Image (cartoon, rainbow, N blue to C red):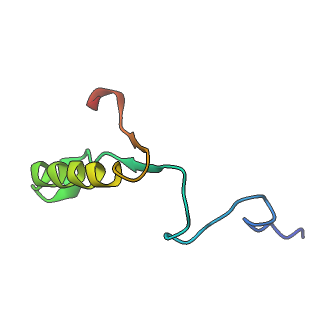
Amino acid sequence: MRQPKSPRSSGYLLPPEWHRQSALWLSWPLNPKWWNGQIAEISRTFAEITKQAARFQPVFINCVARAQ
């Protein structure tokens, strides 16, 4: 049986969090059920984190079309 390739041998790099990066990708918190009734506060906090991160690098946010 053939062994699966490792991420490294497949060309993937899994750098540590302090490694230099060209951008930050985030996913907008969407489903209120996941946030225990705190979606408004979570959204404000997410926006503040995004604002601060954007001072240092480009930030891209994933979200579903209906939330845009």
Does 66 appear above or below 56? above
Q: Residue furthest right?
A: 1
Residue at 39% x, 53% y is 56
Does 33 appear above or below 67? below
Indicate the quadrant containing the N terminus: top left, top right, bottom left or bottom right.
bottom right
Q: 34 or 53, which is in the foreground?
A: 53
Horizontally, residue 15 falls left or right of residue 37, namely: right
The picture places residue 15, in percent across and down from the top left corner, at 60, 68
Residue at 55% x, 72% y is 16
The picture places residue 52, in percent across and down from the top left corner, at 28, 54
Does 41 appear above or below 65? below
Quarter assignment of residue 28: top left
Residue at 29% x, 27% y is 66
- The total number of labels drawn is 0
Does 38 appear above or below 63? below
Horizontally, residue 51 falls left or right of residue 37, namely: right
The picture places residue 61, in percent across and down from the top left corner, at 38, 42
Horizontally, residue 10 falls left or right of residue 33, namely: right
Q: 19 or 44, which is in the foreground?
A: 19
Quarter assignment of residue 11: bottom right
Residue at 72% x, 65% y is 7
Indicate the quadrant containing the C terminus: top left, top right, bottom left or bottom right.
top left
